[in-house]
């Protein structure tokens, strides 16, 4: 089995560059899906309070027989808990559900700039980090302006920024900002929930490399340095998505995929997203 490379975060903690995402995996199917991923070799799981399957992720980890310390687990603070005390207690609830002593990575799920003050929320995450409850803290769906405000008004820089990123939304300026500031970029919906798999350029490339369209797109992410965690509950696809470390795209083909960008989001705009209004 070819090893998944690690990315070193700005505090020295390492994270496997490929993980398994469990958004929209129903709780009843989550434990089996996570077990399949662990059996295939995944050692990084991306969940969130919002996904309602943290307990099942924790159960799969405990039942796998793998030392939990070998599995990198990310969870995220849900939108209703941005106040300082609410964030601290939501974190404890997440840990109870996961059944883990310490979390690897905790993220603010959305910045919600029109609803609350994410710097207050970030101070709660800083406290969890300083208390040793979590090995790294980061943000999700933060735009450049949100990151600048955090840098100006808080102490600990985020270790990661998890953003929507795929060939139809390449996020060049935000990725460059992350890189300049030592923030690792994580790509959510790395295959745009399947939308990029029927792109003619991707299909042509897949046939040229004798790979699937999903493998070509995931490989593009890997070569850009993005951290990815595609989601699937189909074991053959989970395996296929893992087998991307034994081939390489040429620089020209990486550029060709990057050129598919059309700034098209599948999810909400982080500047205006207001969960109370949805
Ligand atoms: P994705 O891009 O991973 O696509 C998932 C879809 O693609 C599923 O319908 C699946 O059946 C299909 N698929 C997966 N592998 C395939 C393959 N090899 N061949 C054909 N089809 C395949 O989308 P996603 O689930 O939205 O994103 C991945 C993860 O990112 C989530 O599970 C979650 O962990 C994270 N996420 C985070 C946020 C956030 O706001 N932070 C938002 C969405 C997702």
Image (tube, rainbow, N blue to C red):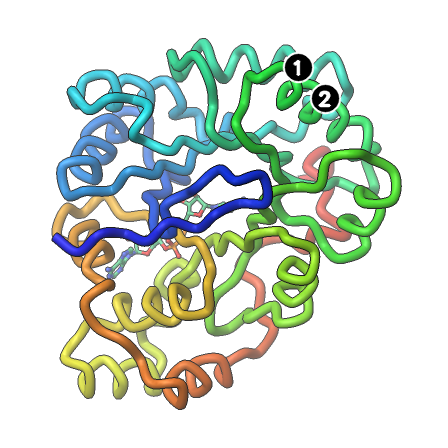
Q: Is residue 84 above or below residue 196?
A: above
Residue that label 1 marks: 88
> Residue, x 83% and y 42% (percent of image)?
114
At numbered mark 1, what does the secondary structure look like: helix, strand or loop? helix
The one nearer the camera, 100 or 37, is: 100
Q: Is mark 1 within 8 Å of ligand 1?
A: no
Res 206 → quadrant: bottom left
Which x, y percent locates residue 116?
A: 82, 32
Residue 124: mark: 2
Q: Position of residue 238 (x, y in %)?
A: 21, 50
Question: Which mark sits nearer the N-terminus, 2 or 1?
Answer: 1
Residue found at the very far right of the displayed protein: 153
Which residue shows up at 66% across the image and 30% down it? 79
Name the foreground residue: 240 vs 232.
240
Is the CB of the residue bearing disc 2 within 8 angstroms of ligand 1? Answer: no
Mark 2 and mark 1 in contact? Answer it, CB < 8 Å.
yes
Left or right: residue 229 compared with residue 82: left
């Amino acid at each position: 089995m070819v090893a998944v490379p690690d990315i070193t975060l700005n505090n020295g903690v390492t994270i496997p560059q490929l993980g398994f995402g469990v958004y929209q995996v129903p709780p009843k199917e989550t434990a089996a899906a996570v077990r399949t991923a662990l059996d295939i070799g995944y050692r990084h799981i991306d969940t969130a309070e919002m996904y309602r399957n943290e307990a099942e992720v924790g159960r799969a980890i405990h039942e796998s027989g793998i030392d939990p310390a070998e599995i990198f687990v990310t969870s995220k603070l849900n939108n209703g808990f941005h106040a300082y005390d609410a964030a601290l207690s939501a974190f404890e609830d997440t840990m109870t559900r996961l059944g883990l002593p310490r979390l690897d990575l905790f993220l603010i799920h959305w910045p919600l700039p029109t609803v609350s003050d994410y710097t207050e929320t970030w101070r709660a995450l800083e406290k969890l980090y300083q208390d040793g409850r979590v090995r790294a803290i980061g943000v999700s769906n933060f735009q450049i302006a949100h990151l600048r405000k955090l840098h100006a008004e808080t102490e600990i820089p985020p270790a990661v920024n998890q953003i929507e990123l795929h060939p139809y939304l390449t996020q060049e300026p935000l990725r460059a900002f992350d890189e300049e500031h030592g923030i690792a970029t994580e790509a959510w919906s790395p295959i745009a929930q399947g939308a990029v798999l029927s792109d003619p350029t991707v299909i042509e490339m897949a046939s040229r490399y004798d790979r699937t369209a999903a493998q070509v797109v995931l490989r593009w992410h890997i070569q850009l340095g993005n951290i990815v965690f595609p989601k699937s509950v189909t074991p053959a696809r989970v395996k296929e998505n893992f087998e991307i470390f034994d081939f390489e795209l040429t620089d020209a083909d990486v550029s060709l995929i990057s050129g598919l960008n059309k700034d098209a989001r599948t999810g909400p705009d982080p500047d205006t997203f207001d969960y109370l209004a949805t």
